[in-house]
Image: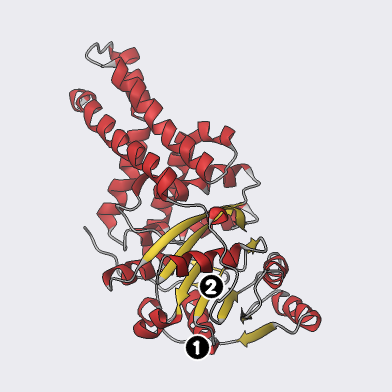
Amino acid sequence: MFNYLINQQLNILVFFLIIFLNSIFNLFRIKNLKKVEDLKENFPKISILIPARNEEKNIEKCVRSILNQNLKNFELIVLNDASEDNTLEILKRIQNEDSRLKIIDNKTLKEGWLGKPNACQILYENSRGDILIFLDADTFHKENSISKGISFLLKNNLDFVSVFPQEIVDSFFEKIIVPFMNFALMAFYPLIPFANGQFTIYKRDVLDKIGGFEKIKDEVLDDIKMVNLLRKLKFKIKILSGKDISFCRMYHDTKSLFMGFIKSYFAIFDYHFLLSIFVFTYLIFAFFYPYILIYLIIKYSFNQINYLNMFLIFMLSYSIFLLTYFKFKYPLFYSILFQITILINSIIGYLSIFYTLTNRRVWKGRLITKKKFKLI
């Protein structure tokens, strides 16, 4: 057993070298929305669509940031998805001040659909734009973020663009948990497809051809499932960083922070049980490997350990997180806690498997339909 652990030095070093080099490439490959040239004119009709459920803490800031955009020819539709708080009242107050805001007060959830795909489908069906922009209600945007996103889509003749907003992280747990998703992006994109449903841009004919959100109607990770579908159908897609121009505060308390990721992590692996267990366990093993070697040296006086490999493994693994925190503008100091980030997110991954299999995933007051899992 001990010899096996020691013999993994080269394998783990190669693993970290590969994803470090990929992170370097992504540092430049993933363009920043702020640096996109703004065409500003000759845009087709634009629809900006926002699904909102229980978003009283966020909705006003989001909507007002859209009403302040430097666009002329656009419609703004917000769907209140049977909110149980003051979301609808806030929307009506804003509408009284600015009639450009259209509100859809939806009280039903179609059978077989999850909340967000259902809301997005209704918004799509009620929109008139040739370009459709879907925004999460917990985002807010500088006045040229939407026009720059559209400019990037049109200039590059794309069908779909996904923008990764700059995540606002205030609490300790936010600062060490939320960056994990950007770490995964930096380390594994484009080897694995990524998208962020917080800010997506579609050409309308793309959604017309696939029937809107029908094919992903029961998916928790509707954004990643959508980009997988679009890739298979050979649509042209790109991702952007929204640093300094588009923002999101995902969670305002620790419970929703944990539950938000618990509902999703098992779904990342399409509910493959053993694969999920392996990935979360391997991440812990790989990132804590230097400490395993130190333990073996102290406890059993092993002398066949390559100290240079051990140092390189630590530095490469840390460097990937340092690049992530820099690229997406997280507080750099917290990057030194990268192994805690790996440990906590892996534990969340195990909990996601448990909550899914025991049908305990609840989000915004709705039970998420249990999915069939695959053993392998």
Q: Residue 200 at x, y = what percent?
A: 49, 68
Callout 1: few (<14), some (14-19), or many (20+) C-alpha neighbours within 10 Å?
Answer: few
Residue 310 image offset from top left, x and y in percent = 32, 21
Work out whether 100 lies above or below 324.
Answer: below
Between 131 and 346, the residue placed more toward the observer is: 131
Where on the picture, by quarter, is residue 308?
top left
Quadrant location of the N terminus?
top left
Residue 49: x %, y % from top left: 57, 77
Is 5 on the left-hand or right-hand side of 367? left
Q: Nearer the viewer, residue 203 or 303?
A: 203
Image quarter of the C terminus: bottom left
Give the residue drawn at x 45%, y 50%.
Answer: 181
Q: Give the residue displayed 34% in from the left and 48% down from the top.
A: 188
Q: Secondary structure at mark 1?
A: helix
| Among numbered discs 1 and 2, the one appearing first in the sequence | 1
Residue for point 56% across, 76% down: 42
Q: Is residue 349 visible?
A: yes
Tell me the kind of residue under disc 2: Phe
- Say which of 306 and 101 sits in front: 101
Question: Can you identify the residue that label 1 sits on?
Answer: 125
